[in-house]
Image (cartoon, rainbow, N blue to C red):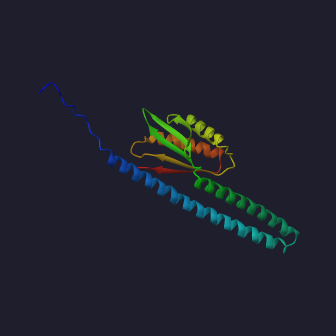
Amino acid sequence: MNGYRKSKGIVIELTALLDVILIMLFWVMMNVQESQSSAVDQAEKRASNAEALLYEAESKLAEFDEKKAEELERVWSLAKELDKNAAANQEALVGYEKGMLLTLNIRYDESGVLYVSSGSDQLGEASTESVTDIYNCMIESLDKLKRSPDDVILCALVYDGDTTLIRDYRTVNAAVDMVRKQYKSFYCTYINTTK
């Protein structure tokens, strides 16, 4: 022993951890893609239904007398509204394909924090302890994106089911419900990364 000591440190193997993270990331991407396919199919069905209603209303409008024409006018306006809704849904799906999904992510450092982002842009963050703070953060984020209460907005709440506290999940969920009252076409999916 000539005065030198060897230090034995802790060696962490990161390869296995990175494999798990990549697998989880791949799974989340596949889950979001499946949700997108389903939403696109639904939007196309709504659009074709609206077109069929419009065509039917146009053909019957020419055949009926004035009283029937008034009734068909009501159907016509309903069909236009359906078509408008289908177009808004389609626009939201195109935005989703371009990464314009509003993402809510619950993470823990010292305490729970909800991060709000769209694509690679972080729009805000709030403590998971206050429904009001989360609601305000989400509304401010939607304002930054210049989204109006009439827009169709797609959202995903991403959380780790093993580490997320149930009270934090419920707090965020309550804030999402509050946002839905103001934004009637606010759709949020919940993605548990541990499944």
Q: Residue 75: x percent and y percent? A: 77, 64
In the picture, residue 110 is in which quadrant?
top left
> Is residue 195 visible from the viewing direction of this image?
no
89 to 13, vertically: above or below: below
Q: Nearer the viewer, residue 193 or 68?
A: 193
Q: Residue 98: x percent and y percent? A: 59, 53
Q: Residue 133: x percent and y percent? A: 56, 34
Q: Going by the picture, which residue comes out furthest to the bottom?
A: 63
Q: Residue visible at 51% across and 60% down?
A: 34
Q: Residue visible at 71% across and 70% down?
A: 52
Q: Going by the picture, which residue comes out furthest to the front?
A: 2
Q: Going by the picture, which residue comes out furthest to the right?
A: 66
Label tally:
0
Q: Nearer the viewer, residue 164 or 96?
A: 96
Looking at the rendering, in which quadrant would you find the N terminus? top left
Q: Residue visible at 53% across and 35% down?
A: 126
> Is residue 134 visible from the viewing direction of this image?
yes
Q: Nearer the viewer, residue 72 or 186?
A: 186
1 to 102, vertically: above or below: above
39 to 160, vertically: above or below: below
Left or right, 132 with respect to 49, comes to left
Q: Nearer the viewer, residue 26 or 76?
A: 26
Q: Residue visible at 53% across and 58% down?
A: 35
Q: Residue 18: x percent and y percent? A: 37, 48
Left or right, 47 with respect to 124, comes to right
Left or right, 189 with respect to 56, comes to left
Q: Going by the picture, which residue comes out furthest to the left?
A: 1
